[in-house]
Amino acid sequence: FFFRYGSVGAVYLIMNDSDILLVDNLCTALFGPDAEARKRADQQLSPLCRVEGINQLRCVMEKSNNSMAHYFVSATLLRLITDSWNTFTVEQRIDLRQWLFNVIGNKAPTMERHNVNTLILVLCRLTKLGWLDHQVHQELPANVNNFFLSSSTPAHVVTGLNILN
């Protein structure tokens, strides 16, 4: 239900506010106490758990304020990066790394700590696996120093130290 097909059959992203709300509700059900609701939510969220769902995951992370949705996205990204590394091109890896860095920088102060830590883990995994792919991955310590550690915001400094840890 998150994928729409164009005239040549290419999948493109369409996620409006009602889609984000639906994902929020499904993620809340996925981690809730009702076994039947968890099963239904898992089935409905499964399209997002494939490499083709990365753009939708990014959209959910950017637009949602739901902690359960953030956890679902970060845990799914970690699994996709780890299990499907060779599926991504070098350009996609760099783009995803830059996006993760920006999301952590922009959303970390308002996100729950465990979700920030999982996003940091995704960023570090991506950096480690891509270390020899491109120079940009080797610049992570300098990027962290320039953005997070030189910030006057204590939350950014703590986040930067967590990335370097």
Image: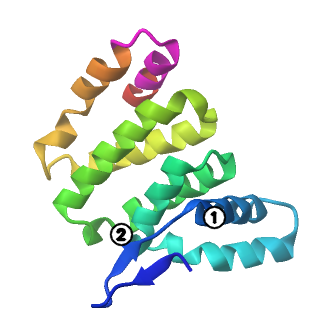
Q: Which residue is drawn at 77% across and 71% down?
A: 38
Q: In this view, does 105 lie to the left or right of 116?
A: left
- Closer to the observer: label 2 or label 1? 1
Contact between marks 2 and 1 (CB within 8 A): the answer is no
Q: Residue at x 33, y 12 (%)?
A: 150
| Quarter of the image where one finds residue 157 | top left
Give the residue number, with chain letter if any, for mark 1: 18
Q: Residue at x 45, y 39 (%)?
A: 120
Q: Is residue 56 left or right of residue 92?
A: right
Q: Can residue 101 be seen in this view?
A: yes
Name of the residue lying farthest toward the top: 152
Q: Quadrant of the N terminus?
A: bottom right
Kindly state the secondary structure of the residue where label 2 is placed. Answer: loop
Q: Which mark is residue 84?
A: 2
What range is drawn magenta here? 150-160
- Three-letter residue code for mark 2: Ser
Name of the residue lying farthest toward the bottom: 8
The secondary structure making up most of the magenta span is helix
